[in-house]
């Protein structure tokens, strides 16, 4: 009877009030959501204004960027001595590796990246080929390239290796060796066979109960005295073995935590399906266990990466070691040299560790299962 | 929901049972292991060191601050001479510091330089006629003697103080002195002090637990002066404290004072006092029992000193071969067969002087007044200039 009106279009949406928009709203939500948070914001800003200008001034405004030697950094009121980093950069990356041979290090690094990159991001390339290359071919290639002695390459003694290169060699070897070794040790520790279980426990508890610095000292100072004269292991090799065994014990405990978190029903279901032990572990249990402990594993990797600086005590110059040893170059000694060097080393280490950490978060998200919160 | 909860419960139960199992079965085993480890720890010195060493000494190898392992490890028995071994390898391997300014430090191109490094290069030049055939192993203070004893290095050219204990107990031989060091003091110029004797009542900064601290105590007590010590673990902290004005004087080895001075905010406001209160003769070390090798290292150093005394430098050595001075002719191998007596080429000293330089050149290049360190020759002048550097005649 009566006309009724049916609206056919929705009315245009209005913007929220201006105080609820953009920067203001963001600040209201994030900085001043309560009076306590507001107070913290103000205090934080105050601290920033205290700390930031001197740091900025030191790092950029009054810093020395170019110079032939340390005399420029010995001037009054000078900030960071970046000229020192500039002059020594090559050494910080390659150590005392001969200049004409440094391409070998670059090639090794490129090969490693080429092998690793397809495994890090999801794609359709045949993964097993890359894994095979990395685990079976790459170590030999890297050894031949870095050490030389075959294929017409000059031998470069490991005592000439140094800098970031040694840091990466030690860390990558430790990381690559510790994960598989750690998985085997963790499985061994949970094994029902007494000999394997006891051996695994002994190994893990021995290496976990000894500080890394002691392991390195034993390897460098005591070992040569026990060996017959003329027989000597390479120092770097000793350190690599020590670091790998040490970190595998830690890894074993992390993986064991993951194994324990897999519900027993999964084991039983796998067995009920008639899977053999290797099948059960590789297809049912380990994928779940390892996914759960990704943060722990990456935590170990980061720890290991930073622990590589300890090789300095046995006379190997990793990145930090070579930076420190260059503090003693009389041409560059200045009040700011050591601070600048440490800041640089810290920054490089942070870049590597932070990347690992971000990657692990990405991995966790990608492998996210219903167990994740 | 209920299914997963039940599963969790079962999992928890099995885990608890597992722990119980661990306790009952592994307690005895782990206890036995622990006991074994402790017993092994105390028994191990018997197995690894000669019987005359008492049990408490091996730990000193790791704990002693001076880095002087008190273990008297018997010198490694050499089947053949070090010289043959070195010739076979094709290079001399020297132990150097991990970085001591002017003595052995990496330069911009990554090569080692400094006066300790030069001694090693001189040995290489004497044997091979090529100073580049020297390789360097950086060693910490703790490692240095073990590395030499075990044959890892051929010579130790690492700012090592010569003392009776080290010369006798370690199976090593000191063959010369390439730098006479000693403990000194640095003060602010504004104090107007000219001598250590005026430091009565001073606050002195130094490192903890080193002989430096003991030397200060001895010196001040014997001179009837009062003082107080502010000690730090690391030398950088000592410098920072001194720079911040927490103490009146800063003491360490003279060579160290000059390099630490560069780290001060206004280095020109500070001066090193002339007095030296301790003797720290630094020199190259070889393994005991190979006299020929000791001679080669000793005379390589002497040749550098002798060359300076005779005025032979790397620049004029070629001309000097035509000199009529018999001492120069003998040094440069024009006359006599002195290299032969050492078992190396007769042009050994010529190779040293042309490729490494004489002692004075090496000193000025490494630590001398024209380097940032600016260390005056002092005790390290030639004997005829009032210093202590003296070479027996080469004849």
Image (spheres, coloured by chain):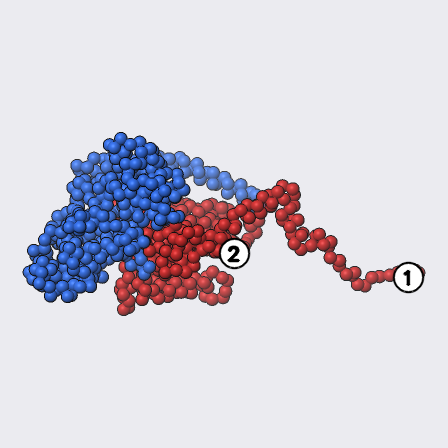
Q: Position of residue A257 (x, y in %)?
A: 46, 45
Q: Residue at x 58, y 47 (%)?
A: A45
Q: Are both tags, 2 and 1, on one chain?
A: yes
- Which residue has dot 1 on it? A3
User: Which chain is indicated by disc 1?
Assistant: A
Instruction: Tell me if B178 is positioned left or right of B270 in this view.
Output: left
Q: Position of residue A356 (x, y in %)?
A: 46, 55
Q: Residue at x 48, y 56 (%)?
A: A60
Secondary element at image label 2: helix
Q: Position of residue A241 (x, y in %)?
A: 32, 52
Instruction: Tell me if A19 is positioned left or right of A228 in this view.
Output: right
Label the blue chain with its letter.
Answer: B
Crowd around label 1: few <14 · some 14–19 · many ≥20 (10 Å)? few
Q: Residue at x 50, y 62 (%)?
A: A122
Tally of numbered discs? 2
Label ID, residue A363: none
- Which residue has dot 2 on it? A362
């Amino acid at each position: 009877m009566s006309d009724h009106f049916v609206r056919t279009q929705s009315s245009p949406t209005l913007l929220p009030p201006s105080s609820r928009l953009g920067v203001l709203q963001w600040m209201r939500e994030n900085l001043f959501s309560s009076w306590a948070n507001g107070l913290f914001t103000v205090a934080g800003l105050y601290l920033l204004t205290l700390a930031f200008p001197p740091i900025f001034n030191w790092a950029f405004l009054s810093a020395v960027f170019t110079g032939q030697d340390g005399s420029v950094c010995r001037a009054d009121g000078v900030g960071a001595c970046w000229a020192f980093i500039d002059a020594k950069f090559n050494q910080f990356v390659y150590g005392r590796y001969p200049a004409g041979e440094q391409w070998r290090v670059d090639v090794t690094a490129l090969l490693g990246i080429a092998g690793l990159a397809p495994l890090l991001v999801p794609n359709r390339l045949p993964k097993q080929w890359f894994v095979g290359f990395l685990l079976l071919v790459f170590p030999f290639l890297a050894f031949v390239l870095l050490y030389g002695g075959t294929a017409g390459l000059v031998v470069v003694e490991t005592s000439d290796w140094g800098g970031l290169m040694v840091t990466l060699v030690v860390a990558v070897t430790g990381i690559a060796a510790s994960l598989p070794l750690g998985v085997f040790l963790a499985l061994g520790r949970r094994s029902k066979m007494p000999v394997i279980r006891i051996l695994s426990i002994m190994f893990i508890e021995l290496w976990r109960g000894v500080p890394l610095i002691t392991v390195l000292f034993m390897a460098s100072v005591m070992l040569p005295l026990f060996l017959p004269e003329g027989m000597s292991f390479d120092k770097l090799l000793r350190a690599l073995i020590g670091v790998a065994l040490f970190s595998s014990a830690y890894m074993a405990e992390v993986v064991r935590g993951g194994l324990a978190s897999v519900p027993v029903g999964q084991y039983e279901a796998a067995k009920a399906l008639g899977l053999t032990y290797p099948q059960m572990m590789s297809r049912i249990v380990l994928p779940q266990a390892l996914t759960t402990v990704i943060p722990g594993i990456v935590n170990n990797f980061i720890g290991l990466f930073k622990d590589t600086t300890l090789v300095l005590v046995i006379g190997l110059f990793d990145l930090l070691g070579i930076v420190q040893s260059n503090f003693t170059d009389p041409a560059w000694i200045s009040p700011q040299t050591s601070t600048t060097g440490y800041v640089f080393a810290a920054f490089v280490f942070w870049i590597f560790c932070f990347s690992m950490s971000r990657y692990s978060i990405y991995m966790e998200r990608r492998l996210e299962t219903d167990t994740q919160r | 929901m209920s299914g997963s909860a039940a599963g969790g419960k079962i999992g928890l139960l099995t885990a608890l049972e597992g722990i119980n199992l661990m306790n009952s079965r592994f307690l005895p085993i782990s206890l036995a292991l622990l006991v074994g480890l402790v017993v092994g720890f105390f028994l191990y010195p018997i197995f690894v060191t000669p019987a005359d060493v008492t049990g408490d000494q091996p730990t000193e190898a790791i704990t002693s601050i001076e880095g002087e392992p008190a273990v008297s490890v018997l010198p490694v028995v050499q089947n053949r001479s070090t010289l043959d071994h070195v010739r076979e390898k094709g290079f001399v391997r020297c132990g150097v510091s991990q970085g001591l300014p002017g003595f052995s430090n990496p330069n911009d191109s990554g090569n080692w330089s400094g006066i300790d490094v030069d001694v090693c290069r001189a040995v290489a030049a004497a044997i091979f006629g090529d100073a580049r055939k020297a390789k360097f192993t950086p060693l910490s203070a703790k490692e240095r003697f073990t590395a030499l004893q075990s044959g890892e290095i051929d010579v130790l050219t690492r700012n090592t103080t010569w003392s009776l204990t080290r010369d006798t107990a370690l199976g090593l031989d000191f063959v010369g002195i390439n730098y006479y060091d000693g403990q000194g003091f640095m003060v602010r110029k504004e104090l107007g002090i000219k001598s250590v004797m005026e430091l009565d009542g001073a606050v002195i900064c130094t490192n903890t637990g080193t002989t430096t601290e003991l030397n200060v105590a001895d010196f001040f007590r014997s001179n009837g002066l009062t003082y107080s010590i502010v000690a730090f673990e690391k030398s950088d902290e000592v410098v920072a404290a001194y720079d911040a004005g927490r103490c009146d004087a800063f003491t360490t080895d003279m060579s160290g004072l000059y390099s630490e001075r560069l780290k001060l905010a206004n280095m020109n406001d500070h001066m090193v006092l002339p007095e030296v209160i301790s003797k720290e003769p630094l020199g190259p070390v070889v393994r005991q029992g190979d006299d020929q090798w000791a001679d080669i290292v000793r005379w390589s150093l002497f040749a550098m000193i002798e060359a300076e005394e005779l005025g032979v430098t790397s620049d004029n050595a070629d001309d000097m071969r035509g000199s009529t001075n018999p001492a120069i002719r003998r040094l440069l191998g024009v006359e006599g067969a002195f290299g032969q007596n050492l078992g190396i080429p007769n042009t050994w000293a010529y190779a040293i002087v042309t490729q490494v330089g004489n002692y004075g050149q090496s000193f000025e290049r490494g630590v001398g007044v024209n380097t940032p360190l600016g260390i005056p020759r002092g005790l390290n002048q030639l004997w005829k200039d009032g210093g202590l550097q003296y070479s027996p005649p080469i004849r």
